[in-house]
Amino acid sequence: MAEEKTNVMRVLDQKKIPYTPHSYPHNEGEAVDGATVASILGRDPGEVYKTLVTRGASKANYVFVVPVLSELDLKKAAKTVGEKSIEMIHVKELTPLTGYVRGGCSPIGMKKRLKTVIDASAQDHAAILVSAGKIGYQVELSPDALVGLIGGRYADVVKADE
């Protein structure tokens, strides 16, 4: 079966950034949680990252890329981007803002370039997996290549393990 190219893969090809595509079975239009994705792909969940879109008190939007089993610490996240507070956006706002659907949101190739922060834990891995912009597809690439491509930066933004 020919790998379906997503827009994310086309962007990576165009920028000549090496990546490994992965796909996993899913029901059409149904988001699969990250722990399940990691398990299906036989990967450590610590290497699989989810893309979260938020809004600050200033009404500006931000993207946070965090390990699938971690929870975004809203206080740390707000401080990192210089906001008083930050909240997750509503699912209905996701597609108009990013061009992606829930479960298939990628930090690469969004409609608008949003300020993006990747959790510092990504630096512990030679490669991480992020959504390829479509449910059922992931791309594996170097975290530094991702930061360089999207103009992001690293910061500790997840809740400490209880």
Image: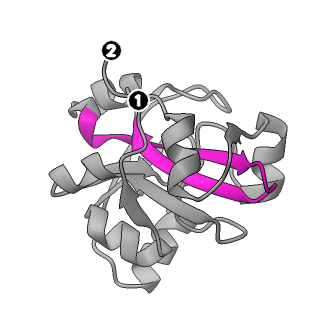
Badge 1 amino acid: Lys
Q: Main secondary structure of the magenta part?
A: strand
Residue displayed at 68% across by 32% down: 29
The mark found on residue 159 in the picture is 1
Q: Is residue 1 visible?
A: no
In front of the other: 78 or 53: 78
Say how many tags the image has: 2
Quadrant where the C terminus is found in the figure: top left
Dot 2, crowdedness within 10 Å: few (<14), some or many (≥20)? few
The span shown in magenta is: 46-67
- Measuring from the top left, give residue 99's x and y in whole percent: 73, 58
CB under 8 Å between discs 2 and 1 = yes
The x and y percentages for residue 13 are 41, 79
Which residue is the site of mark 2? 162
Q: Which of the pair 13/99 is nearer the observer?
A: 99
Between the residue at mark 2 and the residue at mark 1, the CA separation in whole angstroms equals 8 Å
Q: Secondary structure at mark 1?
A: loop
Q: Is residue 137 magenta?
A: no
59 or 116: nearer the viewer: 59
Instruction: Tell whether position 56 is magenta.
Output: yes
Name which residue type carries label 2: Glu
Q: Relative to 82, does residue 14 appear above or below in the rendering?
A: below
Quarter holding residue 45: top left
